[in-house]
Image: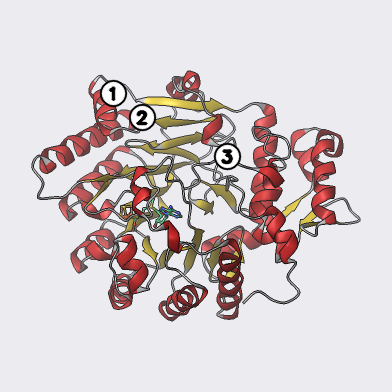
Amino acid sequence: MIPEAFPLDTFRKYAGLALPRHVSYPMPTAWSDREGADFVGQLARRAGDPDAPGISLYLHLPFCETLCKFCACNKVILKKEAKGAADKRNAYLEALLAEIDRVAELPGMNRPVRQIHWGGGSPTYLDTSEIAEIQGRIASRFSIAPDAEIAMEIDPRHTTEDVLATLARLGFTRVSMGIQDFDSAVQQHVHRIQPYEMVRDVVAGARRHGFRWVNFDLIYGMPYQTSETVADMVRKTIEIRPDRIAFYHYAQIPEKIATQRGMDYTHLPGSEEKLSMFLEAIGTFEAAGYDFIGLDHFALPEEPLARSFRDGTIQRNFQGMTTHGGLDLIGLGVSSITHLIGVGFWQKVKEIEAYEEGISRGELPYDRGIHFSEDDLIRQAVISDLYCFTRFDPEDIGRRFGILGREYFARELADLAELEADGLVEFRPDGVVEVTAPLGRVLLRNIAAVFDAYLDPGAYKLGDRYYYSVSA
Ligand SMILES: C[S@@+](CC[C@H](N)C(=O)[O-])C[C@H]1O[C@@H](n2cnc3c(N)ncnc32)[C@H](O)[C@@H]1O
Ligand code: SF4
């Protein structure tokens, strides 16, 4: 239910615009193929630098056995029994292992690895022997810090005891599960059948195998979801009590993602129903002891994300929110993204064949990226602060970057004054701009859009372009 005092008219003015959720700034729409080439040269500048950040590795495993119709991730549907499937999978794994070897040898990579994340696609598409081979190769080529966080996105439908035992033995500390929804009508529509009991049992198995941290991904706003079904999904989630929850708004981009075209768009919930789903979820999760963090995350107070939120070290990144934002992110595998802190983003080719060909030619097949300008870095910090701490402090940004914050952002402060008049933000007497709750929090993307120099002026109230808003 939407509380009576909620300013629905203002909400209607700003909601429903196709605005980015800024898992990166600048957004991929601003990257270019001219700047994809020189990752190795830029990385080499880290060599011998005692202040260089540690490393976070991201591995992309693109294969999935079946298609979930909502999916906006970069995946390849490959039935295991299909003709040629084994060859395709072997060719990819060979290329990935070759890339691991090659990247580990690069100047600038001799730094501790403090985080490893396996994403996809579905890493649990692989056999346990394949998982062990890849993780073993990483362990033998890189120096993994003893307290590194090692996480995998696991699919409950394919996560057996054997998989959990293997991950535990290999030193994985966190599992992240794609849940999406527990409702059977929704599950049937999106082609992802995984009953509540299955998820509950996989989580119990993960706990038995010693996984300290369990994440859930949930989605609201898909066809056939209603306020009641979403409230039920939230209640069931709380019963299982994962440590962290990403509560994603359904990103609907059928223009870009052909596999989403099979969704039944006649049964989509409207903006106000989605608002109701979201506000109710915030209330129920908070009442159950979860902290609401940023745009769409919840975590139990002892969970590292909640702690990093309290101690001010949390950052925005491709996974949404991270406790490891200060690390250089090195992407391995097709379509993976690399982020050298303060330097730039690079993304590898998105097609598996092109990736494998590039690797077989001895290259790292990055095909686009961006080198940050000083202005990009300043705005990156502002947007990260907005998503993580729901405030903008011009003085603090000024100190961090040696600029006069209020002058530098004169145009943005004028736009924010309009948002203040509408109740999305408040100007405090000390000059800090605070995002209001609940209105500003649910319209956080509009507020961040004010600072995105690549959007059209006024996009925060007029945005009409589509953005690829799910992580790589
Ligand atoms: C990169 S995907 C891989 C997850 C894993 N393969 C699984 O399904 O268990 C990570 C998450 O992105 C989210 N996601 C995928 N498509 C989405 C969409 N169209 N809108 C919002 N979230 C989406 C899902 O919650 C999914 O669990
Ligand atoms: S949601 Fe996960 S399992 Fe489903 S198609 Fe996307 S990547 Fe594959």
Assess whether mark 2 and mark 1 are in contact (beta carbons under 8 angstroms): yes
Task: Name the residue carrying label 2.
Answer: 349
Q: Quadrant of ligand 1?
A: bottom left
* Residue 16 percent coordinates (x, y): 61, 53
Among the two numbered marks 1 and 2 on one chain, the one whose residue lies closer to the N terminus: 2
The N terminus: image quadrant: bottom right
Q: Give the label, 1 or 2, closer to the camera.
A: 2
Which label is found at residue 465? 3
Q: Please, what secondary structure does the residue beneath circle 3 have? A: loop
Tell me, yes or no, if residue 37 can be seen here. yes
Assess whether mark 1 and mark 3 are in contact (beta carbons under 8 angstroms): no
Q: Quadrant of residue 95?
A: top left
Q: Amino acid at mark 3?
A: Arg
Q: Give the label, 3 or 1, closer to the camera.
A: 3
Name the residue nearer the viewer: 326 or 256. Answer: 256
Residue at point 51% right, 58% down?
249
Among the two numbered marks 3 and 1 on one chain, the one whose residue lies closer to the N terminus: 1
Name the residue nearer the viewer: 17 or 192. Answer: 17
- Confirm or reject: label 3 Cβ below 8 Å from ligand 1: no
Residue 110 left/right relative to 442 = left
Count how many numbered circles sit on residues in the image: 3
Residue at point 48% right, 65% down?
245
Among the two numbered marks 2 and 3 on one chain, the one whose residue lies closer to the N terminus: 2
Which label is found at residue 358? 1
Determine the CA span between mark 1 and mark 2. Answer: 9 Å
Determine the CA span between mark 2 and mark 3. Answer: 24 Å
* Residue 63 percent coordinates (x, y): 25, 46
Q: Please, what secondary structure does the residue beneath circle 1 have? A: helix
